[in-house]
Amino acid sequence: MARVKWIQSKISNSISGTSDLAEPAVNLPASRSPSGSNYVVTVGLGTPTKNLTLIFDTGSALTWTQCEPCLSCYSQADPIFDPSQSSSYANISCSAPSCTNLLSGTGLPPDCNDSTCVYGATYVDGSFTTGFFATETLTISPTDVITNFEFGCGEDNEGTFNGSAGLLGLARDPISILEQSATQYGQYFSYCLPPLSSCTGYLTFGRGMDTSPSLNFTPMLTVGQTSPHYGINITGISVAGNPLSIPSTVFSNAGTILDSGTTLTYLPPTAYAALRSAFQQAMANYTSAPPFSQLDTCYDFSGVSTITVPVITFSFSGPINLDLDVSGMFYWVNASQVCLAFVANIADTNVSFYGNIQQRTFEVVYDVPGGQIGFGAQGCS
């Protein structure tokens, strides 16, 4: 909820076809973080290469990892990166143009320490990272290496990063990996978020072989005037094949952000009320459970051997229709408290979010030069 409010506030403050490229592709296995709320991949950093597991996030631009010497570091599974042990590490000067770019990528102006660029990035839940902005060799695979990759070497990092070594920023911004790898992968990437912790998905850079047999595209929009986020246009929602009575202006008022780093889907109150009502009617035979946090439609499935749920379908400009996987409908607290994974915004004028739970099992393709985002069912399972 805090992440959603933060992005909404930044956007409100700022508001006063397929490419023919044929770049090579590299595929990384993706898995759920221990908390289940984020998704991670493992990359190599430095010379010699040290493996680091990072959260990949389409809503953030800066890539960073915890670094020695740590002034304050949270606990992570991988050994903390030590730049003094890498022959390819170099700090970035305060006078370098890339240091100036930090403002757009992090929302905070850079600082200087003995002419060395110092970055800072804060996140909506109070988490933060600060340290030296530097260049290093990033190894995505044994044959895919990005030299002089600009990243944050964080010496003071605190927050809820769930044991990961940092973050891989995929937003549309000059400091993101999307832009820094543009010559290799043509600003084209895709992923599939696995439905369970025991399953494996992927993050692919470049135009590889699309895995889904049913890939369809919707226009990529900009929400706000200078937003680095990926916007899409929801045109309707159906429950059990029945379109909900939602005015067309409800979704077009402020737009919708597709975000791998937001767990739930946040809808305009008018749309959420219609979805909740139709879903509750279809699930009337199941025992209700108490609300969990901001999730107000929950069920007790303990002792139930077979569960039949109505299909929830999202329609986007294109037109394309997505039937959500069952794993994309619910947030499981436990068997006796399983909740509909949607939340109402404060007002219909707030920006909506299409979260990562609803994206599970779909191949999601970001074709930035082509200005489109693709969805394909059964991209992973």
Image (cartoon, rainbow, N blue to C red):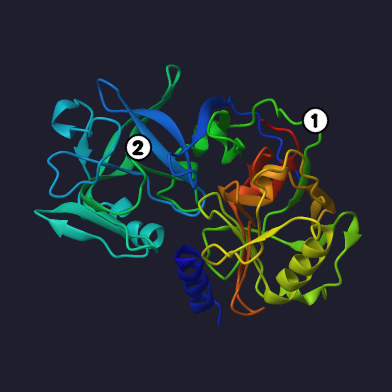
Secondary-structure class at tag 2 = strand
Which residue does the image show at 78% across and 38% down from the upper left? 215
Find residue 144 and report its horizontal and vertical position in percent: 45, 23
Please give the residue where the numbered disc 2 appears in the rendered image: 149
| Left or right placement of residue 143 versus residue 25 in this view | left
Find residue 92 and report its horizontal and vertical position in percent: 22, 46
The quarter in which the C terminus is drawn is top right
Please give the residue where the numbered disc 1 appears in the rendered image: 213
Per the model, the C-alpha gap separating discs 2 and 1 is 34 Å
- Closer-to-camera residue (277/249): 277
Tell me if residue 261 comes above or below residue 141 in the rendering. Answer: below
Find residue 95 and report its horizontal and vertical position in percent: 22, 55
Kindly report which numbered mark, 2 or 1, lies closer to the viewer in this rendering: 1
Look at the image and tell me whether residue 25 can be seen: yes
Among the 4 quarters of the image, the one containing residue 166: top left
Q: What residue occupies the far right of the structure in this picture?
A: 242
Which residue does the image show at 86% across and 72% down from the upper left? 245
Among the 4 quarters of the image, the one containing residue 204: top right
Find residue 46 and report its horizontal and vertical position in percent: 27, 27
Tell me if residue 373 comes above or below residue 235 in the rendering. Answer: above
Tell me if residue 282 comes above or below residue 208 in the rendering. Answer: below
Residue type of the residue flagged with mark 2: Phe
Q: What residue occupies the far front of the structure in this picture?
A: 303
Q: What residue occupies the far left of the structure in this picture?
A: 114
